[in-house]
Image (cartoon, rainbow, N blue to C red):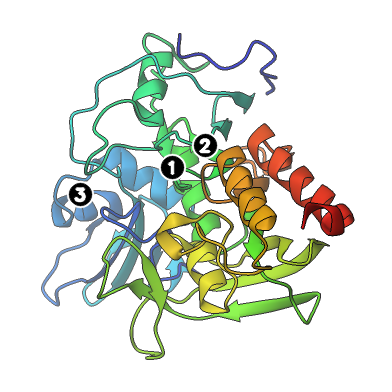
Amino acid sequence: MSTPSSDTPLSNPIQQEDIELGEPELFEHHRIQVDKGQEMMRLDKYLQMRLEGISRTKIQAAAHAGCVLVNNKAAKSNYKIKPCDIISVLLPQPPHEIELIPEPVPFKAVYEDDDVLVIDKQAGLVVHPGHGNINGTLLNGLLYYYQGKTLSNGQPVQPYLVHRIDKDTSGLLLIAKNEDAQAVLAKQFFNHTIERKYNALVWGNFDQNEGTIDGNLERSPQDRRVMHVTDDPERGKHAVTHWRVIERFGYVTLVECILETGRTHQIRAHMRHIGHPLFNDAAYGGDRILKGTTFTRYKQFVENTFRTLPRQALHAQILGFDHPTSGQHLHFESPLPDDMASALERWRNYATNSATLQ
Protein backbone atom coordinates (compact mmCIF):
# COMPACT_ATOMS: atom_id res chain seq x y z
CA MET A 1 0.00 0.00 0.00
CA SER A 2 1.33 3.43 -0.95
CA THR A 3 1.36 5.02 2.46
CA PRO A 4 4.00 6.78 4.51
CA SER A 5 5.49 4.95 7.46
CA SER A 6 3.26 4.76 10.52
CA ASP A 7 5.46 7.12 12.51
CA THR A 8 4.89 10.03 10.12
CA PRO A 9 4.64 13.17 12.31
CA LEU A 10 1.83 15.60 11.60
CA SER A 11 1.70 19.26 12.62
CA ASN A 12 0.05 22.15 12.01
CA PRO A 13 13.47 39.71 -6.92
CA ILE A 14 12.31 36.58 -9.31
CA GLN A 15 15.28 35.16 -11.22
CA GLN A 16 14.73 34.21 -14.83
CA GLU A 17 16.12 30.71 -14.73
CA ASP A 18 14.73 27.23 -14.27
CA ILE A 19 15.48 25.28 -11.11
CA GLU A 20 15.96 21.77 -12.40
CA LEU A 21 17.06 21.56 -16.01
CA GLY A 22 15.48 18.76 -17.94
CA GLU A 23 12.56 17.90 -20.16
CA PRO A 24 10.17 19.17 -19.13
CA GLU A 25 11.09 21.96 -16.69
CA LEU A 26 9.24 22.54 -13.43
CA PHE A 27 8.98 26.31 -13.72
CA GLU A 28 8.24 28.90 -16.38
CA HIS A 29 9.05 32.58 -16.44
CA HIS A 30 6.91 34.91 -18.57
CA ARG A 31 7.62 38.54 -19.41
CA ILE A 32 4.76 40.52 -20.91
CA GLN A 33 4.56 44.16 -21.97
CA VAL A 34 1.03 45.55 -21.95
CA ASP A 35 -0.04 47.09 -25.27
CA LYS A 36 -0.28 50.85 -25.55
CA GLY A 37 -3.99 50.68 -26.33
CA GLN A 38 -4.91 48.19 -23.58
CA GLU A 39 -7.80 49.26 -21.36
CA MET A 40 -7.47 48.99 -17.59
CA MET A 41 -8.24 45.50 -16.32
CA ARG A 42 -7.60 43.31 -13.26
CA LEU A 43 -4.15 41.76 -13.40
CA ASP A 44 -5.34 38.18 -12.86
CA LYS A 45 -7.99 38.46 -15.58
CA TYR A 46 -5.49 39.95 -18.03
CA LEU A 47 -2.92 37.22 -17.39
CA GLN A 48 -5.55 34.51 -17.78
CA MET A 49 -6.26 35.92 -21.23
CA ARG A 50 -2.57 36.13 -22.16
CA LEU A 51 -1.31 32.83 -20.73
CA GLU A 52 -2.90 29.91 -22.49
CA GLY A 53 -4.05 27.05 -20.30
CA ILE A 54 -3.25 28.79 -16.99
CA SER A 55 -6.11 28.99 -14.50
CA ARG A 56 -7.02 32.17 -12.68
CA THR A 57 -6.56 30.30 -9.41
CA LYS A 58 -2.93 29.52 -10.27
CA ILE A 59 -2.32 33.14 -11.24
CA GLN A 60 -3.83 34.35 -7.96
CA ALA A 61 -1.67 31.88 -6.01
CA ALA A 62 1.43 33.16 -7.80
CA ALA A 63 0.50 36.78 -7.05
CA HIS A 64 -0.15 35.96 -3.39
CA ALA A 65 3.33 34.41 -3.18
CA GLY A 66 4.97 37.50 -4.67
CA CYS A 67 5.71 35.73 -7.95
CA VAL A 68 3.95 38.32 -10.13
CA LEU A 69 5.79 41.60 -10.62
CA VAL A 70 4.57 44.72 -12.38
CA ASN A 71 7.34 47.14 -13.24
CA ASN A 72 9.65 45.16 -10.92
CA LYS A 73 7.33 45.40 -7.92
CA ALA A 74 5.16 42.64 -6.45
CA ALA A 75 1.53 43.14 -7.46
CA LYS A 76 -1.78 41.83 -6.15
CA SER A 77 -4.32 40.04 -8.29
CA ASN A 78 -6.66 43.02 -8.26
CA TYR A 79 -4.03 45.47 -9.53
CA LYS A 80 -5.39 47.37 -12.55
CA ILE A 81 -2.98 47.03 -15.44
CA LYS A 82 -2.03 50.11 -17.44
CA PRO A 83 -0.65 50.56 -20.97
CA CYS A 84 3.08 49.72 -21.27
CA ASP A 85 3.24 47.96 -17.87
CA ILE A 86 5.98 45.29 -17.76
CA ILE A 87 4.69 42.11 -16.11
CA SER A 88 6.96 39.27 -14.94
CA VAL A 89 5.35 35.99 -13.86
CA LEU A 90 6.92 32.93 -12.28
CA LEU A 91 4.62 29.92 -12.65
CA PRO A 92 5.27 26.38 -11.48
CA GLN A 93 4.29 23.90 -14.15
CA PRO A 94 3.50 20.18 -13.97
CA PRO A 95 6.51 18.12 -15.11
CA HIS A 96 4.55 15.91 -17.51
CA GLU A 97 2.03 15.83 -20.27
CA ILE A 98 0.99 12.27 -19.49
CA GLU A 99 -2.28 11.29 -17.90
CA LEU A 100 -1.16 10.06 -14.49
CA ILE A 101 -2.63 6.87 -13.09
CA PRO A 102 -2.74 6.42 -9.29
CA GLU A 103 -0.62 3.41 -8.32
CA PRO A 104 0.35 1.87 -4.97
CA VAL A 105 4.00 2.97 -4.87
CA PRO A 106 5.50 2.87 -1.35
CA PHE A 107 7.27 5.91 0.02
CA LYS A 108 8.39 7.18 3.41
CA ALA A 109 7.04 10.50 4.68
CA VAL A 110 8.88 12.28 7.49
CA TYR A 111 6.64 15.35 7.81
CA GLU A 112 3.20 16.36 6.57
CA ASP A 113 0.66 19.14 7.11
CA ASP A 114 -1.96 20.88 4.95
CA ASP A 115 0.66 22.61 2.82
CA VAL A 116 3.72 20.41 2.49
CA LEU A 117 4.93 16.84 2.49
CA VAL A 118 8.58 15.91 3.07
CA ILE A 119 9.64 12.51 1.77
CA ASP A 120 12.80 10.50 2.42
CA LYS A 121 13.11 8.94 -1.03
CA GLN A 122 14.71 5.55 -1.48
CA ALA A 123 17.25 5.03 -4.24
CA GLY A 124 15.73 3.52 -7.37
CA LEU A 125 12.45 5.43 -7.17
CA VAL A 126 11.73 7.72 -10.13
CA VAL A 127 10.15 11.00 -9.01
CA HIS A 128 7.86 11.71 -11.97
CA PRO A 129 6.89 10.12 -15.28
CA GLY A 130 9.10 10.69 -18.26
CA HIS A 131 10.59 8.92 -21.23
CA GLY A 132 10.86 5.24 -20.30
CA ASN A 133 9.24 5.75 -16.88
CA ILE A 134 5.51 6.24 -17.36
CA ASN A 135 4.38 4.15 -14.40
CA GLY A 136 5.60 3.30 -10.91
CA THR A 137 6.87 6.79 -10.07
CA LEU A 138 6.60 8.69 -6.83
CA LEU A 139 3.99 11.00 -8.40
CA ASN A 140 1.85 7.96 -9.27
CA GLY A 141 2.16 6.85 -5.65
CA LEU A 142 1.22 10.28 -4.29
CA LEU A 143 -1.94 10.36 -6.39
CA TYR A 144 -2.86 6.92 -5.05
CA TYR A 145 -2.16 7.93 -1.45
CA TYR A 146 -4.22 11.13 -1.68
CA GLN A 147 -7.25 9.64 -3.45
CA GLY A 148 -10.38 10.91 -1.67
CA LYS A 149 -8.39 12.90 0.88
CA THR A 150 -9.04 16.58 1.56
CA LEU A 151 -7.29 19.48 3.26
CA SER A 152 -8.71 21.06 6.40
CA ASN A 153 -10.61 23.54 4.21
CA GLY A 154 -12.34 20.70 2.37
CA GLN A 155 -10.36 21.06 -0.85
CA PRO A 156 -8.98 17.87 -2.39
CA VAL A 157 -5.25 17.27 -1.96
CA GLN A 158 -3.22 17.74 -5.14
CA PRO A 159 0.51 16.99 -4.92
CA TYR A 160 2.84 19.40 -6.75
CA LEU A 161 6.55 18.92 -7.37
CA VAL A 162 8.78 21.90 -6.60
CA HIS A 163 12.13 20.18 -7.20
CA ARG A 164 13.52 16.76 -8.10
CA ILE A 165 16.29 14.35 -7.21
CA ASP A 166 17.64 11.65 -9.50
CA LYS A 167 16.24 8.13 -9.56
CA ASP A 168 19.35 6.60 -7.96
CA THR A 169 19.92 9.42 -5.48
CA SER A 170 18.40 8.90 -2.05
CA GLY A 171 17.20 11.45 0.47
CA LEU A 172 14.88 14.35 1.20
CA LEU A 173 12.33 15.68 -1.27
CA LEU A 174 9.78 18.46 -0.78
CA ILE A 175 6.22 18.27 -2.16
CA ALA A 176 3.58 21.03 -2.12
CA LYS A 177 -0.02 20.01 -1.41
CA ASN A 178 -1.84 23.00 -2.90
CA GLU A 179 -1.21 25.73 -5.46
CA ASP A 180 -0.59 28.46 -2.88
CA ALA A 181 2.14 26.42 -1.20
CA GLN A 182 3.63 25.50 -4.57
CA ALA A 183 3.91 29.15 -5.60
CA VAL A 184 5.57 30.22 -2.32
CA LEU A 185 8.05 27.35 -2.41
CA ALA A 186 8.79 28.03 -6.09
CA LYS A 187 9.85 31.54 -5.19
CA GLN A 188 12.16 30.21 -2.46
CA PHE A 189 13.83 27.88 -4.95
CA PHE A 190 14.24 30.71 -7.48
CA ASN A 191 15.73 32.95 -4.81
CA HIS A 192 18.08 30.15 -3.66
CA THR A 193 16.89 30.34 -0.05
CA ILE A 194 16.16 26.62 0.21
CA GLU A 195 18.79 24.80 2.30
CA ARG A 196 20.04 21.63 0.60
CA LYS A 197 23.07 19.59 1.60
CA TYR A 198 24.17 16.29 0.11
CA ASN A 199 26.67 13.63 1.13
CA ALA A 200 28.73 12.26 -1.75
CA LEU A 201 31.46 9.64 -1.88
CA VAL A 202 33.84 10.61 -4.69
CA TRP A 203 36.99 9.22 -6.24
CA GLY A 204 40.33 10.68 -5.24
CA ASN A 205 41.76 12.83 -2.49
CA PHE A 206 41.65 16.63 -2.19
CA ASP A 207 44.49 19.08 -1.58
CA GLN A 208 42.09 21.43 0.22
CA ASN A 209 39.39 20.83 2.83
CA GLU A 210 36.74 22.85 1.03
CA GLY A 211 36.08 24.68 -2.21
CA THR A 212 33.53 25.98 -4.71
CA ILE A 213 32.75 24.81 -8.23
CA ASP A 214 31.29 27.53 -10.45
CA GLY A 215 30.57 26.32 -13.97
CA ASN A 216 27.69 26.58 -16.41
CA LEU A 217 26.06 23.24 -17.20
CA GLU A 218 24.63 22.07 -20.50
CA ARG A 219 23.79 18.74 -22.06
CA SER A 220 26.81 16.97 -23.48
CA PRO A 221 26.86 16.98 -27.29
CA GLN A 222 28.34 13.46 -27.18
CA ASP A 223 25.65 12.07 -24.85
CA ARG A 224 22.44 14.04 -24.27
CA ARG A 225 21.70 11.98 -21.16
CA VAL A 226 24.49 13.64 -19.19
CA MET A 227 25.53 17.19 -18.35
CA HIS A 228 28.94 18.81 -18.69
CA VAL A 229 30.57 22.11 -17.80
CA THR A 230 30.89 24.48 -20.74
CA ASP A 231 33.72 27.00 -21.04
CA ASP A 232 31.43 29.41 -22.91
CA PRO A 233 29.85 31.80 -20.35
CA GLU A 234 27.01 32.50 -22.79
CA ARG A 235 25.92 28.85 -22.90
CA GLY A 236 24.36 26.48 -20.42
CA LYS A 237 22.79 27.25 -17.05
CA HIS A 238 24.63 28.94 -14.20
CA ALA A 239 25.51 26.40 -11.48
CA VAL A 240 27.40 26.70 -8.20
CA THR A 241 28.32 23.86 -5.83
CA HIS A 242 30.17 24.33 -2.53
CA TRP A 243 31.97 21.26 -1.16
CA ARG A 244 33.66 20.34 2.12
CA VAL A 245 35.65 17.24 3.05
CA ILE A 246 34.00 15.14 5.76
CA GLU A 247 36.23 12.06 5.80
CA ARG A 248 39.25 10.90 3.78
CA PHE A 249 39.86 7.26 2.86
CA GLY A 250 42.92 7.70 0.65
CA TYR A 251 41.55 6.64 -2.73
CA VAL A 252 38.04 8.02 -2.15
CA THR A 253 36.67 10.91 -0.07
CA LEU A 254 33.35 11.62 1.61
CA VAL A 255 32.31 15.21 0.94
CA GLU A 256 29.39 17.44 1.83
CA CYS A 257 27.97 19.36 -1.12
CA ILE A 258 25.87 22.49 -0.66
CA LEU A 259 23.80 23.57 -3.64
CA GLU A 260 23.61 27.26 -4.40
CA THR A 261 21.72 26.42 -7.58
CA GLY A 262 19.91 23.20 -8.43
CA ARG A 263 20.55 21.90 -11.93
CA THR A 264 20.04 18.42 -13.29
CA HIS A 265 22.99 16.21 -12.27
CA GLN A 266 24.71 19.29 -10.83
CA ILE A 267 26.82 17.55 -8.20
CA ARG A 268 27.58 14.60 -10.46
CA ALA A 269 28.70 16.78 -13.38
CA HIS A 270 30.59 19.30 -11.25
CA MET A 271 32.50 16.59 -9.39
CA ARG A 272 33.53 14.88 -12.60
CA HIS A 273 34.60 18.25 -13.97
CA ILE A 274 37.15 18.72 -11.15
CA GLY A 275 38.38 15.13 -11.49
CA HIS A 276 36.38 13.52 -8.68
CA PRO A 277 33.48 11.50 -10.15
CA LEU A 278 31.02 10.01 -7.70
CA PHE A 279 31.79 6.46 -6.63
CA ASN A 280 29.90 3.97 -8.85
CA ASP A 281 28.28 6.70 -10.97
CA ALA A 282 28.02 4.85 -14.28
CA ALA A 283 26.82 7.88 -16.28
CA TYR A 284 29.83 9.97 -15.23
CA GLY A 285 32.58 7.37 -15.29
CA GLY A 286 32.69 6.54 -11.59
CA ASP A 287 31.84 2.84 -12.01
CA ARG A 288 35.43 1.75 -12.58
CA ILE A 289 38.62 1.94 -10.53
CA LEU A 290 39.94 5.48 -10.94
CA LYS A 291 42.33 5.65 -7.97
CA GLY A 292 44.28 3.01 -6.11
CA THR A 293 46.75 0.19 -6.45
CA THR A 294 47.16 -2.55 -9.04
CA PHE A 295 46.81 -5.33 -6.46
CA THR A 296 44.23 -7.98 -7.29
CA ARG A 297 42.84 -7.91 -3.75
CA TYR A 298 42.24 -4.17 -4.04
CA LYS A 299 40.40 -4.68 -7.33
CA GLN A 300 38.23 -7.35 -5.72
CA PHE A 301 37.57 -5.05 -2.75
CA VAL A 302 36.35 -2.23 -5.02
CA GLU A 303 34.16 -4.56 -7.08
CA ASN A 304 32.59 -5.93 -3.90
CA THR A 305 31.97 -2.38 -2.70
CA PHE A 306 30.31 -1.57 -6.03
CA ARG A 307 27.94 -4.48 -5.34
CA THR A 308 27.32 -3.15 -1.83
CA LEU A 309 26.38 0.24 -3.31
CA PRO A 310 24.96 -0.46 -6.80
CA ARG A 311 24.31 3.22 -7.64
CA GLN A 312 25.97 6.63 -7.48
CA ALA A 313 27.03 7.45 -3.91
CA LEU A 314 24.82 10.51 -3.42
CA HIS A 315 22.36 11.23 -0.61
CA ALA A 316 20.21 14.35 -0.04
CA GLN A 317 20.89 14.61 3.70
CA ILE A 318 19.56 18.04 4.72
CA LEU A 319 16.55 20.06 3.59
CA GLY A 320 15.49 23.39 5.06
CA PHE A 321 12.83 25.88 3.97
CA ASP A 322 10.40 28.49 5.28
CA HIS A 323 6.91 27.09 5.70
CA PRO A 324 4.68 28.58 2.96
CA THR A 325 1.91 29.57 5.40
CA SER A 326 3.44 30.12 8.84
CA GLY A 327 6.84 31.33 7.66
CA GLN A 328 8.50 29.10 10.27
CA HIS A 329 11.83 27.68 9.17
CA LEU A 330 11.68 23.89 8.98
CA HIS A 331 14.83 21.77 8.98
CA PHE A 332 15.09 18.04 8.23
CA GLU A 333 17.98 15.58 8.25
CA SER A 334 18.06 12.10 6.78
CA PRO A 335 20.50 9.41 7.95
CA LEU A 336 22.59 7.66 5.33
CA PRO A 337 20.74 4.66 3.85
CA ASP A 338 22.12 1.21 4.54
CA ASP A 339 23.82 0.73 1.16
CA MET A 340 25.82 3.96 1.38
CA ALA A 341 26.59 3.52 5.07
CA SER A 342 27.87 -0.02 4.38
CA ALA A 343 30.08 1.18 1.53
CA LEU A 344 31.57 3.89 3.75
CA GLU A 345 32.27 1.35 6.48
CA ARG A 346 34.05 -0.89 3.97
CA TRP A 347 36.27 2.02 2.88
CA ARG A 348 36.85 3.00 6.49
CA ASN A 349 38.06 -0.51 7.28
CA TYR A 350 40.17 -0.57 4.13
CA ALA A 351 41.86 2.71 5.00
CA THR A 352 42.69 1.30 8.44
CA ASN A 353 43.80 -2.12 7.30
CA SER A 354 45.05 -1.46 3.76
CA ALA A 355 48.29 -3.36 4.31
CA THR A 356 46.48 -6.61 5.02
CA LEU A 357 43.93 -6.11 2.22
CA GLN A 358 46.66 -5.65 -0.35
Nearest to viewer (mark 3 / mark 1):
1
Residue on which the image places disc 1: 167
* Quadrant in which residue 245 is drawn: bottom right
Residue 172: tell me if it is visible. no
Label 1's element? Answer: loop
Quick one: 155 or 229, which is closer to the camera?
229
Distance (Cα) linking label 3 and label 2: 40 Å
Q: Mark 3–mark 2 contact, CB under 8 Å?
A: no
Dot 1: few (<14), some (14–19), or many (≥20) neighbours within 10 Å? some
Considering only vertical position in the picture, is 221 above or below 203?
Answer: below
Residue 306: tell me if it is visible. yes
Q: Earlier in the sequence, mark 3 or mark 1?
A: 3
* Quadrant in which residue 202 is drawn: bottom right
* Quadrant in which residue 249 is drawn: bottom right
Nearest to viewer (mark 3 / mark 2):
2
Q: Mark 2–mark 1 contact, CB under 8 Å?
A: yes
Considering only vertical position in the picture, is 11 above or below 293?
Answer: above
Residue on which the image places disc 3: 48
Distance (Cα) linking label 3 and label 1: 35 Å
Is 199 placed left or right of 229 in the picture? right
Type of amino acid under label 3: Gln
Residue on which the image places disc 2: 123
